[in-house]
Amino acid sequence: MLILNIGLARKGKPNVAAARAVAELFEAGFTVEAHTVHQSNTEPTLVAIVKPPKFMVDERINAVSCELGQECIGVYNLLTAKGTLIGPSADKWGEFNGEYFLLLNGDRLVTPTARSAA
């Protein structure tokens, strides 16, 4: 299972509707188990728990990112407990940072106090 963070704002264009983002995930072969929208530091963000397809997962996430006009999508793998950024401009965003990654309940994957205490 994966948790995805998909920003819904687009530079110079209207925001993507959450329903459209969910539909794009289905079209790309993901099974959406649960989803909601939370406000991140910068934009409304679709938080989705998905069962990925069996093959070409990164390529499919990249395709969804492109279809929705996003630079990248934050991805957290629940099985490996590792996060990554996938999309056409993921390299511009640097490394995955759990302090910015939203969970289904609106909490952050990593709180700033937890990280500085480690």
Image: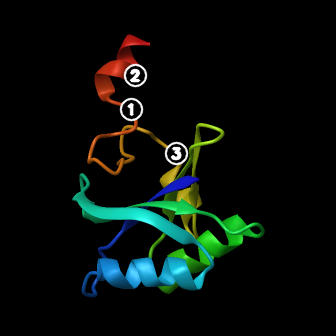
Amino acid at pointer 2: Arg
Taking the image as shown, residue 56 lies to the left or right of residue 11, namely right
Q: Residue 76: x, y in percent? A: 54, 48
Q: Is residue 64 above or below residue 72?
A: below
Query: Mark 2 to mark 1: distance in Å?
Result: 7 Å
CB contact under 8 Å: marks 2 and 1: yes
Mark 1 secondary-structure assignment:
loop
The correct choice, above or below, for 95 with respect to 92 in the image is: above
Residue name at image x 78 percent, y 68 percent? 55
Q: Which of marks 3 and 1 is nearer the N terminus?
A: 3
Q: Is mark 3 on a helix, strand or loop?
A: loop
Residue 97 is situated, as x and y percent measured from the top left of the image, at 46, 41
Q: Report which residue position mark 1 lands on.
A: 110
Crowding around mark 3 (Cα neighbors within 10 Å: few <14, some 14 to 19, many 20+) is some
What amino acid does circle 3 point to?
Phe
**Circle 2 crowding by C-alpha within 10 Å: few under 14, some 14–19, many from 20:** few
* Residue type, numbered disc 1: Val
Q: Quadrant of the C terminus?
A: top left
Residue 86 seen from this side: yes
Q: Residue sitting at 29 percent across and 20 percent down?
A: 113
Q: Which of pointers 2 and 3 lies earlier in the amino acid sequence?
A: 3
Q: Earlier in the sequence, mark 2 or mark 1?
A: 1
Q: Which of 71 and 20 is in front in this view?
A: 20
Say which residue appears at 49% left-offset and 83% top-offset.
24
Q: Which residue, given by chain and number where applicable, does mark 2 sit on?
A: 115
Q: From the image, tell me which residue sits under label 3.
A: 96
How far is the residue under mark 2 from the one under mark 3?
14 Å
